[in-house]
Amino acid sequence: MRTYSFLTVLLWSCMFHVIHMMPSQKRTNKHSHSERITGLSNNDGKTLHRTKRGWMWNQFFLLEEYTGPDTQYVGKLHTDQDKGDGNLKYILTGDGAGSLFVIDENTGDIHAAKKLDREEKSLYVLRAKAIDRKTGRQVEPESEFIIKIHDINDNEPKFTKDMYTASIPEMSGVGTSVIQVTATDADDANYGNSAKVVYSILQGQPYFSVDPETGIIKTALPDMSRENRELYQVVIQAKDMGGQMGGLSGTTTVNITLTDVNDNPPRFPQSTYQFISPESASPGTPLGRIKANDPDVGENAEIEYSISSGDGSDMFDIITEKDTQEGIITVKKLGPFKDTALVKITVEDIDEPPVFSRPWYLIEVDEDAKEGSIIGQVVAQDPDIAKNAIKYSVDRRTDLDRIFNIYSGNGSLFISKPLDREDTPWHNITVIATEINNPKQSSQIPVFIRILDVNDHAPEFANYYETFVCENAKAGQLIQTVSAIDKDQPPRGHRFFFELVPEFAVHPNFSIVDNKDNTAGIMTRRNGYSRSKMSTYLLPIIIFDNDYPIQSSTGTLTIRVCACDSRGNMQSCNAEALLLPAGLSTGALVAILLCIIILLVLVVLFMALKRQRKKEPLIISKDDVRDNIVTYNDEGGGEEDTQAFDIGTLRNPEAREESKMRRDVIPETIFQIRRSAPLWENIDVQDFIHRRLKENDLDPAAPPYDSLATYAYEGNDSIANSLSSLESLTTEGNQDYEYLSDWGPRFKKLADMYGGEDSDRD
């Protein structure tokens, strides 16, 4: 049996940029029709048939002007008969084969040998085939494919002329078209914004403006006078990439001349002329010349003189000399002679308020105009002969927010605060013109300012959507339709685009389909959803508009997983429904929770009682005085035992401060002896005890329970001296106790015991 194999062409893109590929029409090989092949047959005599496949090719893109260190990789030719032993040879023919595009005849790898320029040639048609080196037989039929050169922004816009010349009559209104300039870009206009040109004015403001899309230059200020300035030089810039940062640009110069219109009357430099004529002068005799001045030029400056009235209208004539534009007064006829007197009548001027050039003004300004930008001008004049100077101001009652201001000298309006068309699309203000010499003479004019929209707001969801998906949903099912709104108002209407954020461009659970009508549908991508695994999904969606500059925002759609019936109607989305099938009712859950709370309370009480027992005092007396008495279980050695207790400390408090321990017995509990400052200088025992108690309370080393603190201090000597017989230890002779009898009946018993001479003997 004869085996047939087919050539497979693999093409990988070697560019690091994200390239959107546009599929072209399907191309098929000329051998794509069914072909009957008769060859070896088996014993049953059946004839073998095979049908050759038709190849479908897409357009493949290469980046122009590639400057990488290696050649640009195009793709790979491969056939399943290629065993890797070098028996097959790959051949590439067609446009640029061998010079621009080379192929490794052993591996089938195709590379671009040179950098390509799309502006020279944008499309290459190539053919590929594989042959057997030994037999020279063509293994696969020849196939054709197309390589399209991908454009980059490497050409700046160029104007059709390096310099334009235009003219416009003076005193033309705002918005009068002057001339249209055109710039072309050699880049591909069908891909991206490389060839999208935007016009702007670099020089010539505020007199002229240019339409960013058409390139038409228009007047921006009213009443431009040729007599003040005749020639203007305007520089126009054309920038590709839609005017965005990084685009290439070109410039041109437009020389604009203001042509003259007859807007100035001729005026005599003086009001009175005097000439002398002899009475014998014959007709036609010139008597003198007069000349009036006209600021206009050309035909508009040609002057014709005539004698309007007066006694000499029949006797004198005036002719105009064309070269000098002077009026020559000649004798027409003389006589009869008359006497004349010149009567001068002076018309007194009445002070009148300024007069504006228009009854109202309409100004349009973009909402993104910067603060301080001039948006228009109002013009007023004093109709009086004095032509008093005028100052301009804005009636603040019509502009409470002080958004606009005006130059007082020339009437140019400018912006003082940012504008927002979405907040206030129209502003109606009043401008006041006042004579400087007479502020009482003033007039006002309404100015209507229209704010033009700029795309400065991003689209957002039209509503808050509560979206759910059924657990039994199928793949490709529509679960929500979303729409968007935008505060801007583009002239061509809104057009929104929807797509997932790049991090979720291929979402495993949901997809979005743009309906091309400013709405989009949210579709499921798999069969079945489980609330127990995931009860809520967050789906971030990017919304774009189509105005310039493009604005976008990201909205997050919250999708809940719900239980539905067979017809897709939602039944429950709560987590409580997941617990009911386990066989536990709400009452049972509440009972279990109460039991747990009771157990916790019992444990807390038990721990509290146990801790309270640990805090009980070491010795509980009958009266519960919380005293801590250290018992030594020793009666001591009597007065002779000087080691057990130093009785002299009762008289010498300083001895107790030495913190001596007993040396004859070992106490059961030993506490740290706290040193304190000596207080024996104080004769007040109560104050001494209070201070000792305070020291004991503030001592951090004191035990946490009540203890007995003994202070061996008697205070100063009594006026009655000591009554104790212990004093006898420190005296050598007998003492006289006769004075006890003088103390009264209360001390009689004591006087009998010590006072009598025979008391010792008795």
Image (cartoon, rainbow, N blue to C red):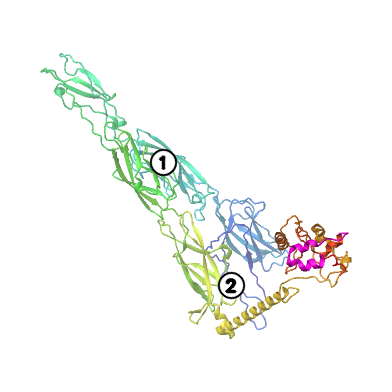
Quadrant for the N terminus in the image: bottom right
Q: Is residue 73 left or right of residue 522?
A: right
Say if residue 218 shows up in the picture. Answer: no
Q: Is residue 59 left or right of residue 278?
A: right
Secondary structure, mark 2, is loop
Can you give x and y, in whole percent of width and height, for residue 717 in the image? Answer: 77, 58
Q: Report if residue 735 lies within the magenta region.
A: yes
What's the magenta region? 731-755
Residue 377 vertical placement versus 66 (above, below): above
Q: Report if residue 390 lies within the magenta region.
A: no
Residue 673 vertical placement versus 566 (above, below): above
Q: Earlier in the sequence, mark 2 or mark 1?
A: 2
Residue 583 falls in image quadrant: bottom right
Can you give x and y, in whole percent of width and height, for residue 82 in the image? Answer: 69, 66
Q: What residue is shown with label 1? A: 206
Front one among 114 and 518: 518
Q: What residue is shown with label 2? A: 35
Q: Residues within 10 Å of mark 2 (few under 14, many from 20)?
A: few
